[in-house]
Image (spheres, rainbow, N blue to C red):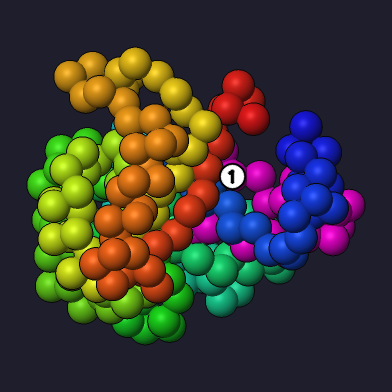
């Protein structure tokens, strides 16, 4: 299904590169990505880094240095026993611990690769993440904050966050729900509201800091 979708999108809309945020803890399949790339002609950039701690109990005792060393190996030497190198750190899950974020910042400093973040669902989380990331040395102009369409429901707060300098990602297009399933107190915005939020960033001068994607992590979202 993924390969068929890639063929359709490439033929209809063009483009030749896809970034896959499936990293450590959420069943990354490097061999499948290689096959999909070869069958479609699309460049696929694989992600390294650590997702939320509940998805990777075997790694929660690793130090920042150990996490950083593993990511650097996957970026520079290859991952999962192959010579295929990852090209991005992400999606880094930020829940109750900071080590994965600090390690990603350390690698960003060392080799300059971009970092993609999965923030918590509180609207204060993105700012806290940027603070921790910068304190660890990470470059904010290489940072992408995902899922902002379900995190900032106020345009003023969104524009205030954009002033920090990282990329603002809207990636829940096509998901039309009455509420956000992971936080039922949140009224889930629809596509019209997402577009309105993006327009507010453009009107505030942040058109070069917007990324648009789709958070496809289960088959039903395709």
Residue situated in front as seen by the camera: 39 or 57: 39
In the displayed structure, does residue 174 sit left or right of residue 191? right
Give the image location of residue 39, x and y in percent.
Answer: 89, 52
In the displayed structure, does residue 153 sit left or right of residue 166? left
| Quarter of the image where the C terminus is located | top right
In the displayed structure, does residue 6 sit left or right of residue 186? right
Quarter residue 87 falls in: bottom right
| Quarter of the image where the N terminus is located | top right
Residue situated in front as seen by the camera: 158 or 90: 158
Residue lying at 52% horizontally and 32% vertically, measured from the top left: 174
Give the image location of residue 193, x and y in percent.
Answer: 34, 37
Q: Would you place residue 49 above or below residue 25 in this image?
A: below
**Do we see residue 165 in this rendering?**
yes
- Residue 44 located within the stretch drawn in magenta: yes
Residue situated in front as seen by the camera: 189 or 144: 189
Residue lying at 48% horizontally and 53% vertically, measured from the top left: 212
Element under disc 1 = loop
- Residue 123 located within the stretch drawn in magenta: no
In the displayed structure, does residue 41 sit left or right of residue 127? right
Within 10 Å of the Cα at label 1, are there few (<14), some (14-19), or many (20+) other Cα atoms?
A: some
Give the image location of residue 208, x and y in percent.
Answer: 40, 73
Residue lying at 62% horizontally and 62% vertically, measured from the top left: 45
Give the image location of residue 177, x and y in percent.
Answer: 40, 19
Determine which residue is flagged by label 1: 28
Q: Which residues are magenta?
A: 27-48
Total labels: the figure holds: 1
């Amino acid at each position: 299904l993924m390969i068929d979708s890639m063929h359709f999108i490439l033929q209809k809309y063009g483009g030749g590169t896809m970034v896959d945020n499936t990293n450590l803890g959420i069943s990354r399949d490097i061999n499948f990505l290689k096959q999909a790339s070869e069958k479609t002609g699309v460049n696929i950039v694989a992600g390294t880094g650590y997702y939320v701690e509940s998805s990777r109990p075997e790694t929660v005792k690793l130090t920042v240095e150990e996490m950083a060393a593993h990511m650097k190996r996957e970026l520079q030497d290859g991952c999962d026993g192959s010579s295929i190198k990852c090209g991005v750190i992400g999606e880094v899950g930020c829940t109750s611990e900071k080590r994965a974020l600090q390690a990603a910042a350390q690698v960003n400093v060392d080799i300059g690769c971009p970092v993609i973040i999965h923030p918590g669902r509180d609207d204060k989380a993105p700012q806290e993440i940027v603070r921790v990331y910068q304190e660890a040395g990470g470059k904010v102009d290489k940072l992408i904050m995902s899922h902002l369409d379900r995190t900032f429901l106020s345009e003023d707060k969104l524009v205030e966050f954009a002033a920090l300098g990282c990329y603002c990602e809207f990636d829940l297009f096509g998901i039309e729900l009455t509420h956000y399933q992971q936080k039922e107190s949140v009224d889930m915005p629809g596509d019209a509201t997402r577009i309105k939020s993006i327009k507010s960033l453009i009107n505030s001068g942040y058109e070069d800091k917007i990324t648009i994607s789709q958070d496809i992590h289960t088959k039903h979202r395709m």
